[in-house]
Amino acid sequence: MSRHETSSRIRLAFAAACPEADLIRCLPGALLPLGP
């Protein structure tokens, strides 16, 4: 699985888990541990 594909799946998972209004707040915290 490519890195881009992994990022897309993570975003989809958080899109499903977080209300759309909270998505912008959820994603940065979720992606921080992944690094650049």
Image (cartoon, rainbow, N blue to C red):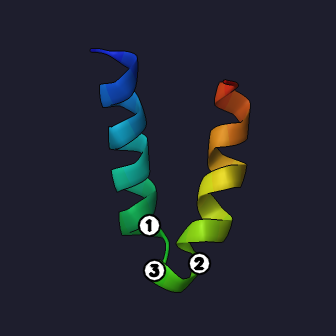
In this view, the residue in front, 25 or 18, is 25
- Residues packed near mark 1 inside 10 Å, few (<14), some (14 to 19) or many (20 plus): few
Asked if the residue under mark 3 is in contact with the one under mark 2, i.e. CB atoms within 8 Å, the reply is yes
The amino acid type of the residue labelled 3 equals Glu
Q: Residue at x 64, y 27 (%)?
A: 34
What is the quadrant of residue 17 in the picture? bottom left
The amino acid type of the residue labelled 1 equals Ala
Q: Residue at x 30, y 28 (%)?
A: 5
Q: Which mark is residue 20?
A: 3
What is the quadrant of residue 3 in the picture? top left
Spatial CA distance of label 3 from label 1 is 9 Å
Residue position marked by numbered label 2 in the rendering: 22
What is the quadrant of residue 2 in the picture? top left
Q: Quadrant of the N terminus?
A: top left
- Residues packed near mark 2 inside 10 Å, few (<14), some (14 to 19) or many (20 plus): few
Pinpoint residue 16: horizontal percent, then vertical percent: 36, 66
Q: Secondary structure at mark 1?
A: helix
Residue position marked by numbered label 1 in the rendering: 17
Q: Nearer the viewer, mark 3 or mark 1?
A: 3
Spatial CA distance of label 2 from label 3 is 5 Å
Pinpoint residue 29: horizontal percent, then vertical percent: 72, 52
Q: Which mark is residue 28?
A: none
Mark 1 or 2, nearer chain start: 1
Q: Is residue 2 above or below residue 22?
A: above
Q: Nearer the viewer, mark 1 or mark 2?
A: 2
